[in-house]
Amino acid sequence: MSVRRIVFVALALLLVAGSRPAAAQELRPLLERVANALQRGDVGGIAALAANAGMSLDVDGRNVGPLGQRQTAAVLRRLFEDREAVTTRVSTIREVGGDPARAFGEITWSTRARGTTIPERATVFVALVREENGWRVTEIRLLR
């Protein structure tokens, strides 16, 4: 392989690698909003982030959706009834491409049953799609 080709390939790889942090910077605020809403038990705040086509939920092995905002809030309300958040932290952000663009994030969510002191850790998988007005949530999966 010639030196010119090696330099070209290296530059192309740097450009591709350089675009990933930009995507993460663009997605992080939305995922932080989801994490903060989880921390507060704000079902309306999460439901308001739903994609135009609705949001699917997979909670405790039951997959429903896509649902409208009111139905999403109702399902999430049941999830928060007997739990209180201890901590939330965005742990993974990845753009996966496509048309429309898609991405996902993972949030580490530590909760405990109300009235107890023992925390339980779960991973909240958040699937995202880019719409005209920015990134929106298409799916939330709770993995315990």
Image (spheres, rainbow, N blue to C red):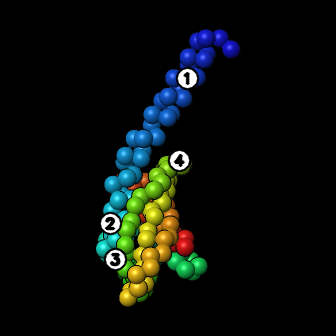
Residue 46, image x, y percentages: 36, 70
**Residue at mark 1 to residue at mark 4: CA–CA distance:** 22 Å
Mark 4 / mark 2, whichever is N-terminal:
2
Q: Quadrant of residue 39?
A: bottom left
**Residue at mark 1 to residue at mark 3: CA–CA distance:** 46 Å
CB under 8 Å between callouts 3 and 2?
no
Quarter of the image with the C terminus is: bottom right
Residue 41 has which mark? Answer: 3
In the picture of the structure, the residue carrying the numbered disc 1 is 10
In the picture provided, is 122 more to the left or to the right than 28? right
Q: Residues within 10 Å of mark 3 (few under 14, many from 20)?
A: some
Q: Amino acid at mark 2?
A: Asn
Nearer to the camera, 82 or 105: 82
For mark 3, give the secondary structure.
loop
Residue 129, image x, y percentages: 46, 57
Residue 78, image x, y percentages: 42, 86
For mark 4, give the secondary structure.
strand
CB under 8 Å between callouts 1 and 4?
no
In the picture of the structure, the residue carrying the numbered disc 4 is 97
Residue 32 has which mark? Answer: none
Mark 4 / mark 3, whichever is N-terminal:
3
Mark 2 / mark 1, whichever is N-terminal:
1
